Amino acid sequence: MPNAPFDARFFEHNVLFWPIARAASAFLTFNGWPPIDEYTRRAGPNAHVVFREQPKKKRRKRRGLFGPSDLYDGRIIEEGWVPTRPENWHDYLNMLVWASFPRAKKELHRRQHKAQAARIGERVSALPNARTREQDALALLDEGGVLIASTSGLIDSVHAALAQRRSADARAFFENRSAVALIFGHAVYEELVLGSGDVWCAGHFLPLQSEELQSVERLASAADKALANTLLEAGSFQSPAALTRVDIAVIRDIHP
């Protein structure tokens, strides 16, 4: 998918960007792509990580042996920095998600790093051809996730409406604020930036307190904490089947 010119005000064009809007507003002074060191300066304190330019990949024949600590998740968990490509919407939006959901992002990559270490051992010359089902689920959440928050008394009904593809019923929950959707996956945000109309997300359901649902200021933080806690549970996200398809049309144009 081709990249697009930088637009510091991208988040003003679609209400679905609201979870990352505060982080994005730190870059409003830029007319062109910010340098990666500005990612760290402006978003790093909230994200609790450093953003550095991703090293260019070595040719496979000359790469030699490598271990989990040398891979993407290993850089994050063991060294505290996120490999990032300059002038790239995918990685720019990933940075904004880090700044908006820091606890959940850290636990997600901790899980991926642990799963990768169990899969390849200490040093290998090449990765196995297939990821585990857990890795697939975590990657789907990271790239395509949407957090569906509702009260504990309604969360099962919201889940049923979405799982059964009863779009009108599901949308009604969001329109009357019985449920709130927070896009988490940076690839979903990228699709919205680049203007793709046929977008779907992988839904994870979070029971929150009613007062958390009613406060936009508290909502993202509460969702971040709840997702991080779920990721800490050993039996969570063992398969992509743990996530539920959510078509973007169900939540389009609805601001909490």
Image (tube, grey):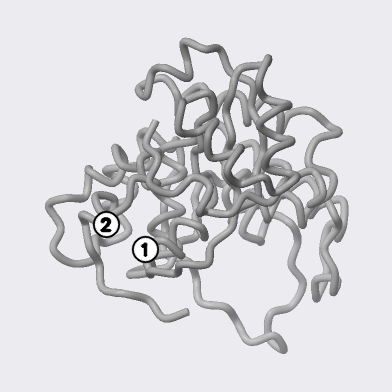
Q: Describe residue 94's horizontal placement relative to residue 21 as left or right.
A: right
Crowding at mark 2 (Cα within 10 Å: few <14, some 14-19, many 20+): some
Residue at x-position 77% and y-position 72%:
65
Local secondary structure at mark 1: helix
Front-most of 145 and 100?
A: 145
Residue at x-position 35% and y-position 22%:
217
Crowding at mark 1 (Cα within 10 Å: few <14, some 14-19, many 20+): many
What's under tag 1, amino acid-wise? Val
Q: Quadrant of residue 48?
A: top left
Q: Describe residue 254's horizontal placement relative to residue 228 as left or right.
A: left
Local secondary structure at mark 2: helix
Q: Which mark is residue 10?
A: 2
- For label 1, the residue is 193
Residue at x-position 73% and y-position 29%:
232
- The quadrant of the image that shows the C terminus is top left
Q: Quadrant of residue 151?
A: top right
Residue 89 at what x, y percent from top left?
Answer: 38, 65
**Vertically, is 62 above or below 233?**
below
Residue at x-position 29% and y-position 37%:
22
- Mark 2 vs 1: CB contact within 8 A: yes
Residue 191 at what x, y percent from top left?
Answer: 46, 65
Front-most of 25 and 215?
A: 215
